Image (cartoon, grey):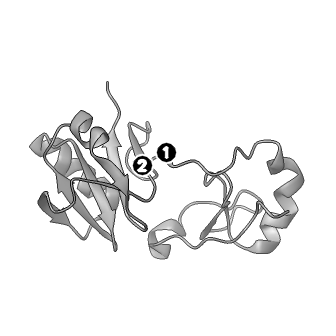
Amino acid sequence: MTYMKEIPFQNRGEMKELPCAACGLGAVFLCSGCRRVRFCSFSCQRKMWKEHRGQCQGTSRVQRAEGAAPDGSWVMVFNTDALPGHDAGAVSTGGPAKAKAVCEEKGFGGMVLWQNTFFLRKEPAEELVAAMQHAQGTHLWLPLPA
């Protein structure tokens, strides 16, 4: 069961509202393999491993952005930044929903999450994708085309 490992969310307070896949309680950990399934404890991970192992697709840098929109219209690229220093504003309260709303309102191409603050990028999403670079602990959020 080496694929299952506790990984705390960066903002545990917001994530406790998401249910554990095993028991339904507030989840504060992700499967480190697929980063899609949430658990409240290592014990619950172990209970679900036989069922989850066949679905776990390993670590993926790109995920549908949690909390960005109910329809999943944004993706998050883990450990990635684009055009660092090109901040067009920052949102440090209100979580991803508020940051997404500000981006959409201003017509920005995406945002970067770093240390619990969303840094907005005014460049088009295509330009942000072309400029992606590894940045440990930083996550690039991009809207999907309609």
Q: Which residue is mark 1?
A: 62
Say which of 10 and 93 sits in front: 10
Tell me whether circle 2 and circle 1 mark residues in contact (CB < 8 Å): yes
x and y percent of residue 120 in the render?
19, 55
Give the quarter of the figure containing the C terminus: top left
Q: Which of the numbered marks, if any, corresponds to residue 76?
A: 2
Seen in the picture, residue 128 relative to 25 is either above or below; the reply is above
Q: Residue 88 at x, y = what percent?
A: 10, 56
Instruction: Specify the quadrant of the image occupied by residue 6.
Output: bottom right
With 62 as the anchor, is 34 left or right in this view?
A: right
Q: Is residue 131 left or right of residue 44?
A: left
Q: Quadrant of residue 123?
A: top left
User: Is 85 in front, or is 55?
Assistant: 85
Question: Which kind of residue does numbered mark 1 sit on?
Answer: Val
Placement of the N terminus among the 4 image quadrants? bottom right
Q: Is residue 15 visible?
A: yes
Mark 1 falls on what kind of element?
strand
Is 103 left, or right, of 137 in this rendering?
left
Q: Specify the amino acid type for callout 2.
A: Met
> Can residue 27 be spotted in the picture?
no
Task: Residue at 38% x, 44% y: name it.
Answer: 69
Residue at the far top: name it.
146
What residue do we see at 53% from left, 65% from top? 17
Q: CA distance from mark 2 to mark 1?
A: 6 Å
Q: Mark 2 or mark 1, which has the lower sequence index? A: 1
- Choose between 40 and 77: the one closer to the eye: 77
Say how many tags the image has: 2
Q: Measuring 37% from the left and 49% from the top, which residue is drawn there?
A: 68
- Residue 44 image position (x, y, % from top left): 79, 67
